[in-house]
Image (cartoon, rainbow, N blue to C red):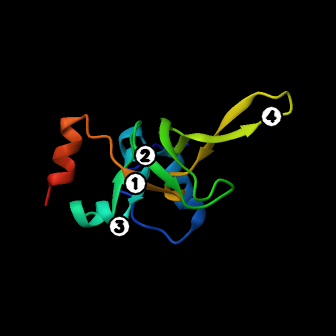
């Protein structure tokens, strides 16, 4: 398999787009793990989307748990998936399992601003 190319020129072919996303390094995949901001936060920070972090409060926009709100429990950059508290599936044996969601199906309603670096990211521009 060819090594990942950071200087990828956009291609219309879905196969190449999927390959780019799958073979990307973690610091590049971090850019893929972004969600929309709510209207209030959009006005406040002048940004449309932001990278998601553990502790952010989000609202699920699409899927089985549509309109459900909860905190982000875990973020998996390798698979570009997010786990939200309350969005659980009940397995046949009765145990509950958090549902893996894609960040594009979430809207951030409240930010976790414990990290000073993240505050600087929001104040940029």
| CB atoms of marks 1 and 2 within 8 Å | yes
Residue 85 placement (x, y as % from top left): 56, 38
Relative depth, front residue between 71 and 54: 71
Q: Which mark is residue 109?
A: 1
The answer to whether residue 101 of the structure is visible from this angle is yes
Q: Which mark is residue 91?
A: 4
Residue 72 placement (x, y as % from top left): 48, 40
- Please tell me which residue is depicted at 18% across the width and 36% down the height of the picture: 116
Mark pair 4, 3: CA separation: 36 Å
| CB atoms of marks 3 and 1 within 8 Å | no
Q: Is residue 120 left or right of residue 80?
A: left
Q: Which residue is mark 3?
A: 39
- Please tell me which residue is depicted at 19% across the width and 44% down the height of the picture: 119
First in sequence: mark 2 or mark 3? 3
Q: Which mark is residue 24?
A: none
First in sequence: mark 2 or mark 4? 2
């Amino acid at each position: 398999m060819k090594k990942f190319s950071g200087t990828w020129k956009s291609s219309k072919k879905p196969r190449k787009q999927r390959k780019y996303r799958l073979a990307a390094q973690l610091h590049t995949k971090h850019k893929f793990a972004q969600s929309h901001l709510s209207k209030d936060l959009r006005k406040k920070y002048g940004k449309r989307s932001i990278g998601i972090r553990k502790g952010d409060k989000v609202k699920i926009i699409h899927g089985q748990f549509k309109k459900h709100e909860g905190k982000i429990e875990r973020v998996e950059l390798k698979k570009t998936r997010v786990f939200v508290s309350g969005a659980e599936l009940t397995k046949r044996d009765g145990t509950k399992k958090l549902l893996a969601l894609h960040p594009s199906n979430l809207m951030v309603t409240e930010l976790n601003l414990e990290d000073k670096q993240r505050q600087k990211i929001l104040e940029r521009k």
